Image (cartoon, helix red, strand yellow):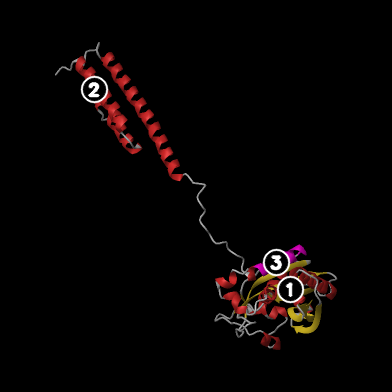
Amino acid sequence: MTILLEDLEAEVAKLKQEASSAIAAVDTLASLDELKVTYLGKKSQLSQVSRSMGQLSASDRPRIGALINEAKVAIQEQFERKRQDLQQAQIQTQLASETLDVTMPGVYRPIGRVHPINSTIDRAIDIFVGLGYTVATGPEMETDYYNFEALNTPPDHPARDMQDTFYLPDGNLLRTHTSSVQIRYMEANEPPIRIVAPGRCYRRDEVDATHAAVFHQIEILAIDEGLTFTDLKGTIEIFLEEMFGEELPVRFRASYFPFTEPSAEVDLQWRGRWLEVMGCGMVDPNVLKKVGYDPEVYTGFAAGFGVERIAQVLHQIDDIRRLYASDLRFLRQF
């Protein structure tokens, strides 16, 4: 069957017109992609017309080939223009949906507050860091060696009765103080040393207005050549002045701790009353020997206090249990 040139020309013109109308009517990019396959794909009608050129005479083929190429170029240009229009419309729609009305009132979000325990820890650390101390931390689950023995408290020492300990089935324990951090740090570092060790501690205390089984402690340790009790006394007085915001009367009372000698309790006169605020002392030579320091060369001092006790004094809190109750009426005061 012979195909006439006029028939192919009419078919190309018809397909070009149909494609133009279809492209104008499409409204999504996905539909546009499908339509492109229909009119410009390998199985499109234009491709079928191209395959029919073989039935034309040699003189007619260039003419119909030029018409097909012209139609493909025109259809391709229409597709690109339509794609740009749809993409721009999509952007405008997205912009309209994301437009913010800056005159609308904001959504209220309650402002968080720093817990008094955390604020007290942060305040104390800032003071000691300003004095040249480095923050040191350690594990809350400890061995008997680091919690007691290395701190000059052997198994039969009566000082163990001072700290009722939570022992674990594997023989370890929950640390009763952050002094264990000092031992670990000294084992890993050579003097001079100045560290502040904050952390959570555990003791089998009866919970009441001033005691808790879980509490927070901050300890300091300084090791160097020639340190004396005078250095310890000056450090504590400066710390308490900064912590309480004014210079207050301070007194040191002789006391006993297995890991310091001599040892002292520190009292602060606050609002007309003497308050016990911390314990301190010169590091016992036996402790220095345990970590490989020569007590003939180095001396040091240590001090520690309970964070909750300081927080109670600073914020006039009558019961330590309020610090753990998560009562928003209480916490919103800070």
x 74%, y 64%: residue: 129
Magenta stretch secondary structure, dominant: helix
Position of residue 8 relative to residue 183, above or below, is above
Q: Mark 3 to mark 2: distance in Å?
A: 84 Å
Assign a secondary structure to mark 3. Answer: helix
Where, quadrant-wise, is the C terminus in this rendering? bottom right
Residue for badge 1? 291
- Label 2 is placed on what type of residue? Lys
Identify which residue is drawn at 22% across, 13% down.
Answer: 57
Task: Report the disc number at residue 14.
Answer: 2
Give amino acid for label 1: Val
Q: CA distance from mark 1 to mark 2?
A: 97 Å
Estimate how packed mark 2 is, as few (under 14), some (14 to 19) or many (20 or more) residues with alpha carbons within 10 Å: few
Q: Earlier in the sequence, mark 3 or mark 1?
A: 3
Q: Which residues are magenta?
A: 119-132
Residue 135 appears in the rendering: no
Question: How far from the left and from the top, in percent, is residue 258?
Answer: 74, 83
Three-letter code, disc 3: Arg
Residue picked out by circle 3:
123
Relative horizontal placement of residue 10, taking residue 211 as reference (left or right): left
The image quarter containing residue 48 is top left
